Image (spheres, grey):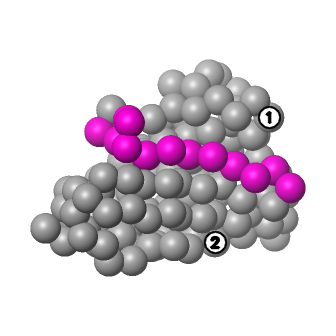
């Protein structure tokens, strides 16, 4: 049974940092991604990483502030978030899927087969 469990969310002031973790169990995946969903908005892509090569891909809105990484031994992916802004507030979900069609395809929800329940990130101004 595949499970993705996120942790590390919380309340932080603008300019602060948080580190999210997503532990995968049941199998390994060739690609992992992070998405976020704010109230009343669509779930949007944040970042993705390939499992073997560690290639990364970011949404323009987080580039330079967020860093995605993985620990193959722990089957865990991380999202280091720095210089947080109030507009980053959302429920962050990790997702797992197959890396088949190139990095840019990982921005689409359809590239992922499994999703975690999410962890809340709130950034106060």
Q: Residue at x 80, y 34 (%)?
A: 52
**Residue topped by disc 1:** 52
Q: Is residue 113 left or right of residue 63?
A: right
> For mark 1, does the 10 Å Cα neighbourhood hold few (<14), some (14 to 19), or many (20 or more) residues?
few
Q: Which residues are magenta?
A: 61-73
Q: Residue furthest top?
A: 102
**Residue topped by disc 2:** 5
Dot label at residue 112: none
Q: Is residue 87 left or right of residue 65?
A: left
Q: Do the residues bearing badges 2 and 1 touch, measured as CB atoms within 8 Å?
A: no
Q: Quarter holding the C terminus? A: bottom left
Q: Is residue 117 left or right of residue 86?
A: right
Q: Quarter holding the N terminus? A: bottom right
The image position of residue 111, as x and y in percent, is: 58, 39
The image position of residue 83, as x and y in percent, is: 30, 52
Give the vertical position of 95 relative to 12 (above or below): above
Q: Residue furthest bottom?
A: 11
Give the vertical position of 119 relative to 54 (above or below): below
Of callouts 2 and 1, which one flags the residue occurring earlier in the amino acid sequence?
2
**Residue 61 in which image quadrant:** top left
Q: Is residue 57 visible?
A: yes
> For mark 2, does the 10 Å Cα neighbourhood hold few (<14), some (14 to 19), or many (20 or more) residues?
some
Q: Let me know if residue 36 is in the magenta part.
A: no
The image position of residue 29, as x and y in percent, is: 77, 47
| Residues at marks 2 and 1, CA–CA distance in whole angstroms | 21 Å
Give the vertical position of 53 relative to 67 (above or below): above
Q: Is residue 55 left or right of residue 61?
A: right
Element class at badge 1 = loop
Q: Residue at x 58, y 26 (%)?
A: 103
Q: Nearer the viewer, residue 113 or 80?
A: 80
Give the vertical position of 76 relative to 3 (above or below): above
């Amino acid at each position: 049974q595949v499970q993705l469990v996120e942790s590390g969310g919380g309340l932080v002031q603008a300019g602060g940092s948080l580190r999210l973790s997503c532990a995968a169990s049941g199998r390994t995946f060739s690609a992992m991604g992070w998405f976020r969903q704010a109230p009343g908005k669509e779930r949007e892509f944040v970042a993705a990483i390939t499992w073997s090569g560690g290639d990364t891909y970011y949404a323009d809105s987080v580039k330079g502030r967020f860093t995605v990484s993985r620990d193959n031994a722990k089957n865990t992916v991380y999202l280091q978030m720095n210089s947080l802004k109030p507009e980053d507030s959302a429920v962050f979900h990790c997702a797992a899927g197959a890396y088949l069609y190139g990095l840019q395809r990982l921005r689409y929800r359809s590239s992922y087969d499994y999703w975690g329940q999410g962890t809340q990130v709130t950034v106060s101004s």
